[in-house]
Structure formats: C-alpha cells, structure tokens
Image (cartoon, rainbow, N blue to C red):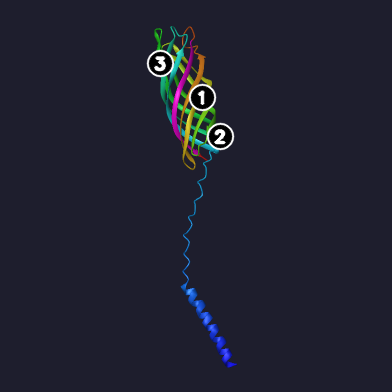
C-alpha cells in the first residue's frame, strides 16, 4: 500500500514539474502599443449674442447746391470715429443681425457757385441697419442696409446758411473675424445718402442742398 501511495505521489510531482517547465518555456505575450487618443474637434464658433464696439474710418462723396446762382457740385471728404451696438442670431451658417451706430465726423467741402462759395458740412451721422451674414466658423462676410440720419449744414459765406437733421438710407458690405472667443475685428464699406433740403437762408433762388458719401471704416467688437 505504501508503495502504491509513493508511486502515485511521484507521478503527481513529475506532472507538476512538467507543467511548470512547459510554462517557463512559453514565449512571453507582447504588450500591445498604447492606443492614440484622438482629441475632440474644436467647437464651431457661434456668432449669436449682443455686442458693442468702436470704429474709425474715412469718407468721400459729393454735395450739390442745385439752384445757387449758377449752381454748384463739389467733393466732400473727412474722417470719422464712432460707437455701435448690435445683436446677432445664427441659424446654421446664416447670421441675422440688427446694428445701430453713431459717428462724429469732419465731412465737408466747398465749391464756387456763381460769384460766391457754397459749403457743406456733416458733423455727425448715424445708421440703423439689418445685417445678413454667412458664418464660415470665425470668419463672417455680410451685407447690410437700412436707415441713415445725420446733420447737414449748408452755408454761403456772406449770404447765410442753414442746417437740418436729415433722414436717408445706407447700404454696404463687410466682413468680420473673431480673433478671440468674445472679440472680433470688422471692416466694412457703406454708401450713405442723406437726401436734400432747401436752404432758405442761402440766397435766391433757394438752393436744394444734398449730401452723399462713400465710407470705409474698421474697428473692434466685444460680444457678451
């Protein structure tokens, strides 16, 4: 009986030793290379929201005194700076907006009319416009148009002058680039037409004085 038990024990030990030897001879499993983790794509910029801004620019155009002596038509030009406020609402890549601005300017010019000199000045003007833009992430070209208003001063030195706050229209194009999460740079062109008015103190026959201007301006907007 003892011999049988010893034989069985010996067989078991041999089997265990054989399994251990086979396990030692097996090649080690290669470690898998770490998988690269893809960063999530950056969020698409959204133009929706309220904003304020400031800008500066230059304007050039013309003014007409259509009945002053022999009449006069002359160039006007000058610098401007202003402030604005607006709101955008983005649907897909289409951006709808409304913007208003007020500008202080030194627009003016003069020309000979008969034996006198006719002068036109616009010390300030503003606009209320709609905007329609296309959002290409942080870049947005747009078209714009709406109401323009401003003070037009007409004068004939030595004869007299008058002024009137005029209502007119404006239209233009522009582009805006968001260089920070809440800040953007804007450049735009506007055509402004303030119409005309009768300057009753500018002589006889009474001239009708009008004013139009091409404006290029650039500035920074801050979004909230």
The residue stretch that appears in magenta: 207-222
The residue wearing badge 1 is 171
The picture places residue 120, in percent across and down from the top left corner, at 44, 17
The image shows residue 33 at horizontal and vertical percentages of 46, 60
Residue 6 location, quadrant: bottom right
**What is the distance, in whole Å, between disc 1 and disc 2 at their CAs?**
19 Å
Question: Does residue 192 lie above or below 84 as drawn?
Answer: above
Name the N-terminal-most of marks 2 and 3.
Answer: 2
How would you classify the magenta stretch by its main secondary structure?
Answer: strand
Residue 110 highlighted magenta (yes or no): no
Residue carrying label 3: 110
Q: Where in the figure is residue 212, as x and y percent of width and height?
A: 47, 19
* Residue under the point 48% across and 14% down: 209
Quadrant location of the N terminus in the rendered image:
bottom right
**In the image, which disc is placed on residue 155?**
none
Q: CA distance from mark 2 to mark 3?
A: 44 Å
- Identified at 44% across, 31% down, the residue is 218
Badge 3 density bin: few <14, some 14–19, many ≥20, Cα 10 Å: many
Secondary structure, mark 3, is strand
Q: Nearer the viewer, mark 1 or mark 3?
A: 1
Q: Where does residue 42 sit, x and y in percent of width and height? A: 50, 46
């Amino acid at each position: 009986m003892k011999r049988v038990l010893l034989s069985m024990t010996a067989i078991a030990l041999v089997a265990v030793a054989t399994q251990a030897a086979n396990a030692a001879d097996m090649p080690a499993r290669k470690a898998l290379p770490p998988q690269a983790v893809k960063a999530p794509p950056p969020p698409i910029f959204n133009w929706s929201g309220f904003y304020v801004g400031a800008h500066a620019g230059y304007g050039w155009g013309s003014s007409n005194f259509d009945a002053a002596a022999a009449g006069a038509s002359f160039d006007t030009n000058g610098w401007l700076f202003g402030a604005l406020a607006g709101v955008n609402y983005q649907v897909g890549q289409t951006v709808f907006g409304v913007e208003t601005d007020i500008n202080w300017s030194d627009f003016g010019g003069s020309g000979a009319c008969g034996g006198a000199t006719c002068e036109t000045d616009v010390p300030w003007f503003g606009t209320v416009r709609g905007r329609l833009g296309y959002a290409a992430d942080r870049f947005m070209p747009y078209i714009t148009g709406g109401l323009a208003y401003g003070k037009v001063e007409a004068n004939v030195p030595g004869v007299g002058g008058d002024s009137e706050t005029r209502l007119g229209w404006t239209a233009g194009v522009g582009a805006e680039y968001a260089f920070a999460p809440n800040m953007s740079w804007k450049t735009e062109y506007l055509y402004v037409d303030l119409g005309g008015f009768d300057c009753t103190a500018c002589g006889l026959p009474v001239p009708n004085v009008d004013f139009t201007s091409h404006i290029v301006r650039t500035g920074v907007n801050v979004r909230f």
